[in-house]
Image (cartoon, rainbow, N blue to C red):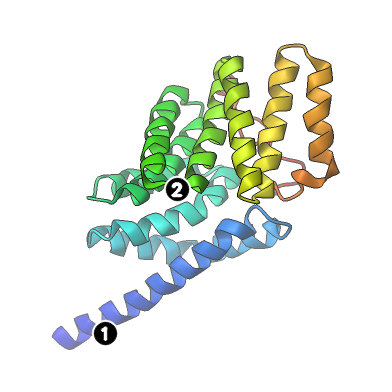
């Protein structure tokens, strides 16, 4: 029995390594030009990811579990499977975790809650995620949380706050050379300008986006309206 248990653990460790590696690739692939291929790849691997996550959580290995969940975030966003992603986030957040892993899970939780129209929950989770990321000096997660918070405030009708958040995270994304983030922030600023009736201001960031800054942003437009109704995904994304 001990031999069998050891063999099973060895097999699960191999599965975990595969899941972490594939999720790290998916994190980039799902927001790149090969998005459709990566949506299909993650769908094919989803049972493997589920098994790895359940096994890691059972053993309290929150850091590795958080890495997998972070990598799959846009799969759940684009495919509309926020409930599953939130369930994994809740389980991981119930475990002792270092600030970096906690901030990642709060970012995913806040983003997925936003897609469900749960703006209050999203705001709380994302605000906490940003604070932890700032303490850890993780500029990437700070920028992502501010981008997501911009969408939350836009959906809530807090347009000045949304504009400031999109402007700040846009600068951060550009400094970090993350084109999809810069494009998403520009689009957010355009939406805010349209909401305030400033068509001229809306045209400028939209034109920048069309010139290619946001070309690697297939997740653009995954959000919700102020009434919590899910908006359409970007043209052709995830079909």
The mark that comes first in sequence, 1 or 2, is 1
Badge 2 density bin: few <14, some 14–19, many ≥20, Cα 10 Å: some
Label 1 to label 2: alpha-carbon separation:
38 Å
> Would residue 1 be visible to someone looking at this image?
no
Estimate the x, y position of residue 119 in percent, counting from the top left.
47, 24
Quadrant in which the N terminus appears? bottom left
Q: Residue 142 in the image: x percent, y percent?
A: 48, 40
Residue sitting at x 24%, y 50%: 95
Residue at coordinates 69% horizontally, 26% vertically from top-left? 189
Taking the view exactly as shown, the residue that stands out farthest to the top is 197
Residue 114 appears anywhere in the view = yes
- What residue sits right under mark 2 in the picture? 138
Give the structural element (helix, strand or loop) at label 2: loop
Task: Pinpoint residue 9: horizontal percent, then vertical percent.
Answer: 26, 77
Look at discs 1 and 2 and give the one toward the viewer: 2
Q: Residue at x 56, y 57 (%)?
A: 27
Q: Quadrant of residue 184?
A: top right
Q: Check if mark 1's residue and mark 2's residue have beta carbons within 8 Å.
A: no
For this view, does 94 lie left or right of residue 139? left
Looking at the image, which residue is at 32% across and 47% down? 99
Q: 51 left or right of 4?
A: right
Residue on which the image places disc 1: 7
Residue 77 in the image: x percent, y percent? 56, 43
Disc 1 packing (10 Å; few <14; some 14–19; many ≥20): few
User: Picture quarter containing residue 51?
Assistant: bottom left
Relative to 85, say whether 168 is above or below: above
Residue 211, numbered label: none
Relative horizontal placement of residue 231, taking residue 140 as reference (left or right)? right
């Amino acid at each position: 029995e001990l031999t069998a248990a050891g063999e099973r653990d060895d097999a699960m460790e191999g599965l975990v390594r595969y899941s972490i590696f594939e999720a790290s690739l998916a994190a980039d692939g799902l927001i790149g030009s090969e998005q459709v291929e990566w949506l299909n790849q993650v769908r094919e691997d989803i049972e493997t990811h589920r098994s790895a996550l359940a096994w890691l959580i059972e053993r309290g290995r929150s850091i590795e579990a958080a890495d997998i969940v972070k990598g799959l975030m846009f799969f759940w966003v684009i495919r509309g499977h926020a409930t599953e992603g939130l369930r994994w986030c809740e389980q991981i957040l119930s475990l002792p975790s270092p600030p970096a892993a906690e901030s990642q899970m709060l970012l995913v939780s806040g983003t997925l809650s936003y897609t469900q129209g749960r703006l209050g929950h999203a705001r709380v989770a994302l605000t906490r995620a940003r604070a932890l990321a700032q303490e850890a000096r993780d500029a990437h997660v700070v920028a992502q949380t501010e981008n997501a918070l911009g969408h939350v405030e836009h959906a809530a009708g807090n347009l000045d706050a949304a504009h400031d958040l999109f402007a700040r995270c846009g600068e951060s994304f550009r400094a970090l050379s993350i084109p999809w983030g810069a494009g998403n922030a520009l689009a957010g600023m355009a939406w805010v300008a349209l909401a305030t009736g400033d068509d001229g201001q809306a045209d400028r960031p939209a034109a920048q986006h069309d010139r290619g800054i946001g070309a690697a942003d297939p997740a653009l437009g995954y959000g919700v309206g102020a009434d919590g109704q899910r908006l359409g995904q970007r043209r052709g994304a995830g079909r």
